[in-house]
Image (tube, helix red, strand yellow):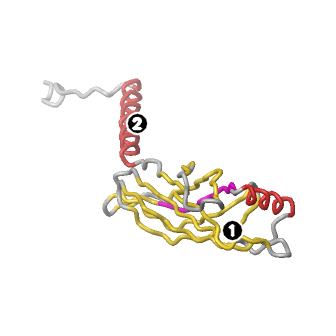
């Protein structure tokens, strides 16, 4: 006589069923990761130069530039999350020649907020190459000095108590005009931001 356990015999899954179940589980895990990444992924920050001027622009007899680059940057956070900047390094360039820079202390930027950043970047103490000095003097006598502004920094985003990893932010603002004839007039220059 057969026992009660023999009637409920369990069948083993075939190898094909095991592979299908494993692939389905992996697909579900990948879908969850992609959905989470799309929800948490930060949008691109926006940066622009709203004003640029040079105070005390002069060359020494040794070829070093004297003066201070006065910049007003505008940072816009289009995200629904708070952006936290650790610090920003702002550099002023004329072509491939570094002219000066400054470090801006870190700050918090609320979601969908626009923040003005005032930068006073002193000129570097190293002498400028003679050909660059001649070109800069020629541009100044023409009335406009085209500069490039580069910004580097680290930023992370906060979601309540949770924060993301640190992202390296680089921005380049090409051909920022410093107008000597009319220093109060300025058209905003948008930067290319890479995170």
Disc 2: CA contacts within 10 A as few (<14), some (14-19) or many (>=20): few
Question: Residue 127 location, x and y as percent?
Answer: 82, 71
Q: Is residue 106 above or below residue 184?
A: below
Element carrying mark 1: strand
Q: Are marks 1 and 2 in contact (CB under 8 Å)?
A: no
Q: Is residue 77 above or below residue 27?
A: below
| Residue occupying the point 35% across, 56% down | 111
For residue 54, which quarter of the picture? bottom right
Quadrant housing the N terminus = top left
Question: Residue 92 location, x and y as percent?
Answer: 66, 62
Element carrying mark 2: helix
Question: Residue 31 location, x and y as percent?
Answer: 37, 37
- Label ID, residue 26: 2
Residue 194 visible (yes or no): no
Spatial distance from mark 1 to mark 2, Cα to Cα? 52 Å
For residue 91, which quarter of the picture? bottom right
Dominant secondary structure, magenta: strand
| Residue occupying the point 79% across, 71% down | 59
Q: Give the extent of the magenta segment.
A: 144-155
| Residue occupying the point 41% across, 31% down | 23
Q: Is residue 129 left or right of residue 183?
A: right
For marks 1 and 2, give the one nearer the viewer: 1
**Residue 146 is one of the magenta-drawn residues:** yes
Q: List the residue tagged with mark 1.
A: 100
Question: Which mark is first along the chain, 2 or 1?
Answer: 2
Q: Is residue 106 left or right of residue 32?
A: right
């Amino acid at each position: 006589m057969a026992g009660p356990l023999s009637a409920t015999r369990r069948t083993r899954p075939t190898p094909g069923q095991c592979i299908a179940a494993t692939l389905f589980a992996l697909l579900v895990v990948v879908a969850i990761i992609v959905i989470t990444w799309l929800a948490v992924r930060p949008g691109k920050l926006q940066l622009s130069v709203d004003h640029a001027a040079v105070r005390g622009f002069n060359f020494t007899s040794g070829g070093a530039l004297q003066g201070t680059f006065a910049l007003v940057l505008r940072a816009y956070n289009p995200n629904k999350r708070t952006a936290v900047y650790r610090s920003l390094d702002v550099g002023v360039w004329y072509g491939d020649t570094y002219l000066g820079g400054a470090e801006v202390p870190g700050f918090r930027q609320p979601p969908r907020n626009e923040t003005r950043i005032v930068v006073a970047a002193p000129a570097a103490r190293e002498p400028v190459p003679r050909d660059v000095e001649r070109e800069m003097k020629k541009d100044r006598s023409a009335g406009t000095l085209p500069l490039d502004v580069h910004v580097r920094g680290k930023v992370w985003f906060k979601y309540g108590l949770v924060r993301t990893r640190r992202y390296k932010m680089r921005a380049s603002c090409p051909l920022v005009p410093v107008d000597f004839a009319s220093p109060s007039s300025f058209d905003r220059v948008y930067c290319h931001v890479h995170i």
